Image (tube, rainbow, N blue to C red):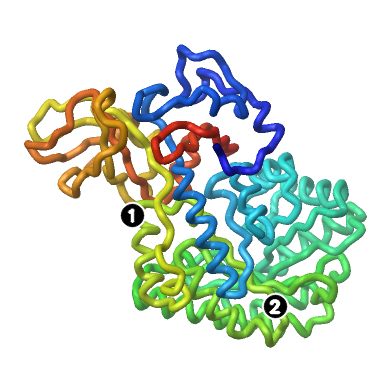
Amino acid sequence: MSALPRIPAIDASILDATFKGFPGTAAPVRVDGLAARAWNILREDVPFPVAVIRQSSLEHNRNWMRRFLAAADARLCPHGKTTMSPQLFAAQIEDGAFGITCATVSQLQVYREFGVQRVLMANQVVGRQEIAFVMAELARDPSFELYLVVDSVAGVERLADAARASGLARPLRLLLEVGMIGARTGSRSVDAAGAVIAAIESRFPWVEIHGVEAFEGVFAANAEGERSIEQLLALVLEVAAIARRSPAATTTSPWLLTAGGSAYFDVVAARLGSAAGVTDATVVLRSGCYLTHDHTSYANAQRARAARSLIVQSLGEGFRPALEVWTHVQSRPEPERAYLTAGKRDVSFDLDLPRPVAWARPGVDAKPRTLDAAHAVTRLNDQHAYLTLPWDSPLAVGDLVALGISHPCTTFDKWPLIYLVDDAYTIVDAIRTYF
């Protein structure tokens, strides 16, 4: 049985042959009726390629993150853009998430349709329609909490003017965004951040400071990148100390120090947490990829995290890869080359190519068998994966191959429907995404 929270609107939605991975010969079914069909991936009960999340790995990852947060004395506001799945948002909130992080107002519209009540907007909101939606939602629902980031006087002015024009009954919650030269958005210095603070003070009470935000995930995973992260977090703390004394700083809500993507959240928790008591701050991390992890990029990040963090070491086995894309061998025209029925439309390829991790022969194998490192995807077309393999590989036309992915974000956005499966690869639930 699925352990995901139930969302009535999604439970009542209909799955049919218009969804990739749904059998064209099957009658449509409500999401909450899917498990009763007991379809199994290894029996080819659904068409391929097909994306699945292994339930046992998902539950392991949820539990691991809960234990890490307790040990690090931090909160999590996971980035929802990773999955854009309200069911997974609900699971994260059930696990104690501070809220859900958002990248665009289009994403925010989905969040609000499914009742997410606290959102951290990690991108600047500057457009007319985007600002109009923000003001309308804040006016419509007094219990909705939204944190917006700003890094310029112009950005403050646009938001404050809109709040005044709309007659908003409460201040906009602003986070000062800081960044590094050559990196992404954010004020580059204490002086630049000071100008933003002054702009907020001049427009108080339409806008109010609620903390400081940054994103460290733009830096390379090497010694130089780690030094840049330390410099960025030092700037966060320096700006926070100044902003906390501002007359425009909140006195009624949590004061936030927030950063932490999916690679360096341990560093952020340690560095910001060590100084949080000075400003009575709540440290908020924003990792989104931990739920499903991956087989390459975040697997590498996990090894680095385990090497540097005593807390991580104390928690035992780290995240397990939960997301797989299953495909068929469609051709083996050369002794050391086969072609799979999945490609750029099905798997991530922005950081690394997918990695073959398992295979099964329908009608023979009741569970997958491991594929060794001699099997490698070397190229993708839209619907083909080029698989290099040894001449004596057992793979034959019609066999099933599981592709482990790198960077889950850009696999999720290819699948409106992802199956949740048990360890026997029987489908126990349907996960909907809304990109």
State whether residue 303 appears in this view: yes
Say which mark, if any, is on residue 296: 1
Corner quadrant of residue 363: top left
Is 221 situated left or right of 146 in this image? left
| Contact between labelled residues 1 and 2, with CB atoms less than 8 Å apart | no
Q: Is 167 drawn above or below residue 114 in the view shown?
A: below
Q: Amino acid at mark 1?
A: Thr
Residue 57 in percent (x, y) is at 45, 50
Could you classify mark 1 by the number of other residues whose Cα lies within 10 Å: few (under 14), some (14-19), or many (20 or more)? some
Residue 154 in percent (x, y) is at 72, 64
Q: Who's the residue at 53% across and 49% down the image?
A: 82
Q: Say which quadrant the C terminus sits in.
A: top right
Residue 346 in percent (x, y) is at 39, 35
Q: Amino acid at mark 2?
A: Ala
Q: Who's the residue at 62% across and 29% down the image?
A: 32
Q: Who's the residue at 66% across and 53% down the image?
A: 94
Corner quadrant of residue 62: bottom right
Q: Is 140 drawn above or below residue 228 in the view shown?
A: above
Is 123 situated left or right of 113 in this image? left
Q: Is 93 drawn above or below residue 76 in the view shown?
A: above
Question: Mark 2 sits on what residue?
Answer: 281
Could you classify mark 2 by the number of other residues whose Cα lies within 10 Å: few (under 14), some (14-19), or many (20 or more)? many
State whether residue 289 appears in this view: no
